[in-house]
Image (cartoon, rainbow, N blue to C red):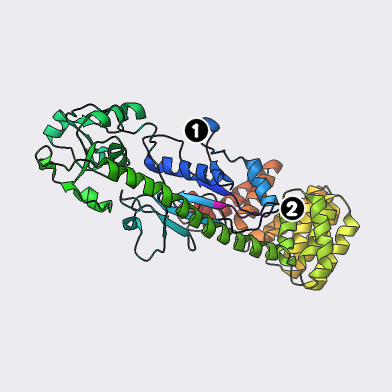
């Protein structure tokens, strides 16, 4: 199901980003995510795995790895990536505009709570995995490789049993001694290939599962009977199954024989419905992505959005693009002082002092109270080696707002560059006498300069004042000073 019209000239669908571990047969949830990524690519969509290398992917699947360059290209194209997360991933680490949450097990069954984002699209493997109040659609796909797991070559008579209790043994308890001694353990700490596991399932009579696992389906595919062992952990996992026995009844209760025709019908049904459910997944996620992309495209046309992009360009040193945008925004945002102010900053960086003064005057004509703008211009002029020009703008800023204490160190620096050290000291002394958020920085600069001068008495005086500064005490953990 393709919700968008195809085009010869531009793409009409949005990409999928999967946050998943490397492909490993022993983790059914990981396999499911890799298989879904592969299926989306097979359907003609674009799906990528994140934070992996090609060597960590299955060579049998179409699961390409996302690179920073590809993601940057998607952003440039105005696409809205769809992040696909399992239930165990907290939040939205990929910062994708659209998220799809696939509940492959019951959230929190392992005691670890995860937070989900408002507006997430949710899909579930089993209905029991859906938390109360969450709307979700079914998404179940084939995860049993029938090329490996089948009953071909099974012996005339099966013997013994095997069991799987990986998380149960690690986190809750041990199995009965009889199970440990008589059964074949299929837990993950015993390294086995899928082919070796399939051979065990083809030759043993029963698989006993202490927790939800795709091994149960693999066992059915191999003609092995399956029963779940009733434990409190099984209840926590939310698994609904018809064949449950007590641990002490292992080997004593007859487990119904696997009906080959029913098993085949079960796998056929999963495969047939899977493509329909994937189509539903595609339709819902692509519709949400298209809506976000449309809204974002409309937002990008607003002058306020373009102003923020221009500011980002300025701070990212994309100065030519920023200059063009600010110039265009002068007329579009006549009541906003920032386009003119940033043009002043651009001129200051290039040493165009007079032009910088003209633009900052234009910005202050729009908002005469923005003392921070000439103060910022003064700091940029200092960095550009234009200390004399910086003094005038910093003094203007402090005339507008004498309590703009962050501007005092910059003005003192500009005065010092012009050989006016005494004025700089007096300025800092007066500013240091007034409690402010910038007092620690002012005192620190005074101490640095006094040390350079070698004025011992002044150094001692400044240190004592630093110690008496509440902000300094909080940082240093010093006890309150009783005063001088």
Answer whether labels 2 and 1 touch (C-beta < 8 Å). no
Q: Position of residue 285 (x, y in %)?
A: 53, 57
- Span colored in magenta: 78-82
Q: Is residue 158 magenta?
A: no
Q: Is residue 312 left or right of 201 when viewed as pictured?
A: right
Image quadrant where one finds the N terminus = bottom right
Q: Is 160 drawn above or below residue 390 in the view shown?
A: above
Q: Residue furthest right?
A: 354
> Which of these two is toward me, 81 or 270?
270
Secondary structure under tag 1 reads: loop
> Which of these two is toward me, 405 or 121?
121
The residue drawn where x is 28% and y is 51% is 237
Q: Mark on residue 313?
A: 2
Q: Mark on residue 60?
A: 1
Q: Of the residues tagged 2 and 1, which is closer to the observer? A: 1
> Which of these two is toward me, 332 or 484?
332
Secondary structure under tag 2 reads: helix
Quadrant in the picture for residue 433 = bottom right
């Amino acid at each position: 199901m393709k919700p968008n019209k195809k085009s010869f000239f531009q793409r009409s669908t949005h990409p999928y980003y999967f946050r998943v571990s490397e492909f490993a047969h022993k983790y059914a949830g990981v396999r499911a995510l890799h298989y879904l990524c592969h299926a989306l690519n097979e359907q003609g969509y674009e799906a990528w795995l994140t934070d992996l290398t090609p060597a960590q992917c299955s060579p049998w699947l179409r699961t390409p790895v996302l690179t920073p360059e590809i993601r940057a290209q998607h952003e440039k194209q105005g696409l809205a990536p769809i992040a696909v997360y399992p239930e165990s991933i907290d939040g939205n680490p990929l910062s994708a505009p659209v998220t799809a949450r696939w509940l492959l097990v019951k959230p929190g069954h392992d005691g670890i709570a995860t937070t989900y984002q408002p507006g997430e699209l949710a899909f579930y493997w089993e209905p029991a995995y859906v938390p109360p109040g969450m709307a979700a659609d079914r998404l179940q796909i084939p995860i049993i490789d029938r090329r490996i797991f089948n009953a071909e070559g099974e012996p005339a008579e099966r013997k013994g049993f095997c069991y799987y209790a990986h998380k149960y043994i690690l986190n809750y308890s041990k199995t009965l001694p009889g199970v440990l001694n008589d059964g074949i353990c299929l837990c993950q700490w015993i390294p086995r290939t899928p082919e070796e596991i399939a051979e065990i399932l083809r030759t043993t009579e029963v698989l006993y599962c202490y927790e939800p696992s795709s091994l149960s389906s693999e066992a059915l595919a191999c003609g092995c009977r399956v029963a779940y062992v009733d434990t409190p952990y099984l209840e926590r996992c939310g698994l609904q199954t018809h064949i449950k026995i007590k641990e002490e009844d292992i080997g004593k209760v007859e487990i119904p024989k696997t009906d080959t025709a029913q098993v085949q019908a079960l796998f056929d049904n999963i495969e047939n419905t899977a493509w329909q459910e994937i189509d539903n997944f595609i339709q819902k996620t692509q519709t949400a992505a298209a809506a976000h992309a449309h809204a974002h495209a409309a937002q990008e046309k607003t002058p306020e959005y373009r102003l923020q992009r221009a500011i980002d360009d300025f701070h990212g040193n994309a100065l030519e693009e920023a200059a063009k945008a600010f110039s265009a925004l002068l007329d579009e945002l006549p009541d906003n002082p920032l386009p003119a102010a940033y043009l002043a900053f651009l001129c200051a960086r290039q040493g165009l002092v007079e032009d910088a003064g003209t633009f900052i005057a234009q910005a202050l004509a729009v908002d005469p109270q923005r003392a921070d703008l000439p103060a910022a211009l003064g700091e940029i002029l200092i960095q550009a080696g234009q200390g004399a020009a910086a003094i005038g703008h910093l003094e203007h800023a402090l005339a507008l707002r004498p309590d703009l204490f962050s501007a005092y160190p910059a003005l003192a620096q500009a005065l010092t560059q012009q050989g006016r050290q005494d004025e700089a000291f007096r300025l800092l002394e007066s500013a240091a006498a007034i409690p402010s958020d910038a007092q620690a920085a002012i005192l620190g600069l005074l101490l640095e300069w006094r040390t350079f001068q070698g004025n011992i008495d002044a150094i001692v005086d400044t240190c004592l004042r630093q110690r008496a500064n509440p902000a300094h005490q909080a940082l240093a953990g010093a006890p309150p000073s009783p005063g001088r």
